[in-house]
Image: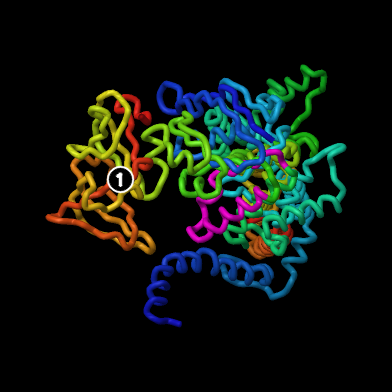
Amino acid sequence: MFNKNNLKGWIYLLPALIFTGVFMVYPLFDVLVYSFEEGYNFASQTYNGIGLFNYSYVLHDPYFLQALKNTFILVIITVPFSTGIALLISLALNSLKKFKDLFQTIFFLPYVTNTLAVGLVFMILFKKTAYTDGLVNLLLNSMGISSIDFIEGPYWAKMFVLCFYTIWIVLPFKILILTSALASVNQDYYNVARVDGTSRWRIFYRITLPMISPSLFYLVITGFIGAFKAYSDVVALFGTDLNAAGMNTIVGYIYDMLYGNSGGYPSFASAAALILFVIVLTITVINLLVSKENVQYQ
Amino acid sequence: MKIVLEHLTKQFIARQGKGIVTAVDDFDFTIPDGKLIGLLGPSGCGKSTTLNLICGLEVPTKGKIYFDDLDVTELPPEARGVGMVFQNYALYPHLTVRQNIVFPLENLKGDKRLSREEMNEKVMEAARLVQIDELMDRKPNELSGGQQQRVAIARALVKTPGVLLLDEPLSNLDARLRLQTREQIRRIQKETGITTIFVTHDQEEAMSISDMIIVMKDGALQQMGEPQKVYNDPVNLFVAKFLGTPAINVFEGKIKDKGLYIGEDLIGERDCDDQDVYVGIRPEAFIPDKKGSFRCRFDRVETTGRDTSIVCHNEQCISDEDVRAIVDADAQLNNKDGIIRFSLKPHKTYAFSKKDEKAL
């Protein structure tokens, strides 16, 4: 196994292996170990016992259940909507003859802006203060709808802002990927289809969609994973005390357990982290299985 | 279906800088019904544009196109009843051979819509015609180039089009497959009787299977007619140079007192005024002859398979290579002091005006 060529290969791999080992594999095992150690204490490096207590606690914690619910709603709404909207915009961009580059740039701009900055802008747009109801409410008022407190008001309003924001922030990347996927489809396929009298819908459904399916699939998978890991966006919109706002996410819960107001519970944080890991793994495996049937690699 | 082109012109705006590129310049001719037509010319001469105009993917700048008596100039491609095979075949990679071939049939709507059985029957009929009926459940990437090409032809034929258009059908195949496939195309065209136009830059390909060839250069029609007639009777220097392998030998020459000269050698007669001309001599026109009037400096003999060619030099020769003469394998060579003499077959010897390069 370790002949001369192989050895050379391993040496090349070494830096990458060391970094993955130290910063990925070792912490992963550490988290696994923590999650089974009851009441582990960083400072004294002690724990009370070994068992499933941490999992049981986390799964019965109303804050965690709230975070779980929030995260799932976020995933289920934003992934399909953002991918669908990105596809529509990309198709429109692709059919443009003039100003295509200009529009592509405009759509890509949000990608290079800072998440927290954009979050603050969204908060100003939606937030009700003593002086003003915010731009969105002014718009609603002008249409004869009374003001809604999107940031500190009812749950559905806060969820709406969060989903709206998330979709908006992930769009640029998806549009970028999809426009390049669309542009790389050989024009001859469309010419053949035209000569054969194929309807627009059928061209889209039978030719375009299968041709870009690898990119679409990539976006859905990374979209799911990204949405499950949502945290910084939520902080930008609703502040750091997410449990009080009822808008916590799983990653937020893990963070709070480690460092937040209720911080200092690495065992609970580890258990929650592993639950998140299992959820993401399951969803990704399901995605892969579904894609086997439907994604066309050339 | 006969195709009539009436002053057909297509101009593009040049991509870089200003100006207009005329890809097809005032085509005004009729393509007869049920023939196999080779549209021939060097790369970038407007052959593919012509094909796209006929199939409707491009809209002409000026002029009209008729299929029989029907004006199709304004019709979109799907309303013209044409089948098209693209250079890279453009088979849908995610569909099987069967799904690819049935695709055009599934587009039909209303009264034209066929039942599943009828579709199947048509698909199998087309598949049998191009001899791929045993590969129906394969994906395109599991087929060889030649097979992919036949699938593309089957897909173009399944709607029984009035016109079949093939864009560089053989250019993606290797040499052996090319010979085979061009016979296939010939056979398929004969069996179906569909007016077929194929584009090629390979003159041998066009000459070998076409009923008629159309030679183009820089968007302009040069000559059309039966391949052998065009070869034997080129209207200008370009056509003469473009057809034939090895290429025609071209010399500086002159006409004096109704005699055709290369240098000091009188090689033929021309009933024209005295002038400087280009002289074209086909390689097969040379006959080694002790008493021949045309002299060349002998270089070497090359034997490739059945052909024996004599390579020699002449100061007046202006074609890229040396003078190349194809002679009988058992011809007696008569080189003396490095000079070889030929007599020339008069019907394979051409004179072209220096002014416009037209045949005299």
Quadrant for residue A140, please give it: top right
Quadrant (top left, top right, bottom left, bottom right) of the C terminus of chain A: bottom right
Say how the picture is coloured: rainbow
Q: Is residue A147 above or below residue A194?
A: above
Across and down, in percent, residue B108 comes to 80, 40
Instruction: Specify few, some or many for label 1: CA neighbours under 10 Å numbering under 14, 14-19, or 20 or more.
Output: many
Label 1 amino acid? Leu
Tell me which residue sits at (58%, 69%) in the image. A30
Q: Is residue B198 visible?
A: yes
Across and down, in percent, residue A99 comes to 55, 26
Q: Read off the magenta span.
A: B161-190
Can you identify the residue that label 1 sits on? B344
In-front residue for pair B133/A11: B133
- Was residue B183 drawn as part of the magenta stretch in this picture? yes
Q: Secondary structure at mark 1?
A: strand
Quadrant for residue B162, please give it: top right
